[in-house]
Image: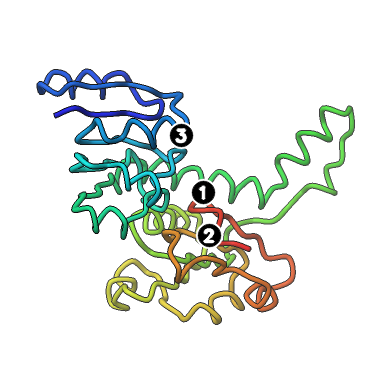
Amino acid sequence: MKILISEPIEQQCVEILKAEGFEVDFKPTMTADELKHSIGNYSALVVRSATKVTADVLANASTMKVIGRAGTGVDNIDINAATRKGIIVLNVPGGNTVSTAEHAISLLMALARNIPQAHQSMKEGKWERKKYVGVELCGKTLGVVGLGKVGKEVAKRCLGFEMKVIAFDPVLAPDIAAKMGIELLDLDTLLRRSDFITVHTPLTNETRNLIDVRALAMCKKGARIINCARGGIIN
């Protein structure tokens, strides 16, 4: 089997595939046109998020059997087009769970304490302590939109800050959330009650523009929104 890797990835991954007996072409700077014209030479493709595996590209994938996404989402791959070609699409949903959760927590605290603004002010030789004092997380309400792997990890850490955690997840059973000490609500109620909102859903037709003008109008004045998922979820 001949494998194409079209984006930068750890060299160890390349070595593992070669050790398993695969022929690997590592082309991390490949353009969309190059991918389109050469994909027919491969049985497998490994991508991250930059490579757009469109229906147009897949039309030339005459020998392709599998596409592996080295990350969580698969929104850069046309799943329907791949399915029509009999190509299996795989991802690694747990690969960066903790890293993403920690990143969300970092942004949460930076928002609460105005850290970027205070840092810039200090660099300009100012001492504007009162202006950037911020707020405590303790006692505030965090709304988690999407209580999957990452959402749960964020929620666990925020419960440690003594925040009240509420969540919206249409596929999660309320008793599972209750065992974590989380109240499961509909989205509109979550938006109205949250001091901080963190988004952890995949980007699908249902979640695109999930946070839009209507949703923002429901939020508390001064509510802070964090998005460590996909950009298209928030308009």
- Say whether residue 8 is left or right of residue 129: left
**33 and 113: which is toward the camera:** 33
On the rendered image, what quadrant is the C terminus found in? bottom right
Q: Are marks 2 and 1 in contact (CB under 8 Å)?
A: yes
Q: Residue furthest left?
A: 21
Local crowd size for mark 2, using a 10 Å CA cut-off: few (<14), some (14–19), many (≥20):
many
Give x and y (percent) for residue 217: 70, 77
Q: Amino acid at mark 1?
A: Ala
Query: Which residue lies under the disc numbered 3?
Result: 33
Helix or strand or loop: what does disc 1 sit on?
helix
Q: Position of residue 195 (x, y in %)?
A: 62, 67
Mark 1–mark 3 CB contact (< 8 Å): no
Q: Which mark is residue 104?
A: 1
Closest to the camera, between mark 3 and mark 2, is 3
Dot 2 falls on a residue whose secondary structure is strand
Element on which disc 3 rests: helix
Amino acid type at image mark 2: Thr
Determine the image quadrant of residue 177: bottom left
Looking at the picture, does residue 149 appear above or below residue 45? below
- Give whichever of discs 3 and 2 has the lower sequence position: 3
Residue drawn 33% across and 66% down? 180
Q: 50 or 60: nearer the eye?
A: 60
Is residue 12 shown above or below 194? above
The amino acid type of the residue labelled 3 equals Asp
Front residue of 135 and 8: 8
